[in-house]
Image (tube, grey):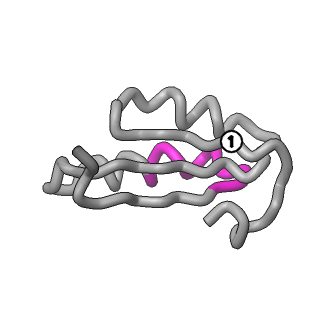
Amino acid sequence: MKPLISVLIPVHNRQELITRCLDSVLAQTIDDIEIIVVDDGSTDATRKAVRGVQDRRIKIIELPTNCGVSVAR
């Protein structure tokens, strides 16, 4: 069954903020969500930070190079 709500988070080089962002979404009162993080070719530890948040509702799509927010969305 598909989740009721999909949250799309395009991100580029925001290792210092992505965990806070994910924690905020996960703290919402509705559980029927999926979180899709699109890493837009980050060169810092953004991907590692996303993988560090253990929740089955989080999916990460990794773009090999920075394509811009329009492509990431």
Residue located 39% across and 27% down the image: 54
User: Where is the N terminus found, in terms of image quarters?
Assistant: top left
Q: Main secondary structure of the magenta part?
A: helix
Residue located 57% across and 34% down the image: 49
**Residue found at the far front of this picture:** 1
For residue 67, above or below residue 53: below
- Where residue 6 sits: x, y (%)? 36, 58
Residue located 35% across and 32% down the image: 55
Part of the protein shown in magenta = 11-21
- Where residue 35 sits: x, y (%)? 41, 49
User: Where is the C terminus found, in terms of image quarters?
Assistant: bottom right
- Where residue 53 sits: x, y (%)? 43, 32
For residue 60, above or below residue 71: above
**Residue found at the far left of this picture:** 29
16 lies left or right of 33 = right
**Residue found at the far right of this picture:** 65
18, 33: nearer the viewer? 33
Label 1 residue SS: strand
**Is 14 included in the stretch rendered in magenta?**
yes
- Where residue 13 sits: x, y (%)? 73, 50
18 lies left or right of 47 = left
**Residue found at the far bottom of this picture:** 70
Q: Quadrant of residue 57?
A: top left
Residue located 82% across and 60% down the image: 67
Residue beneath label 1, please? 62
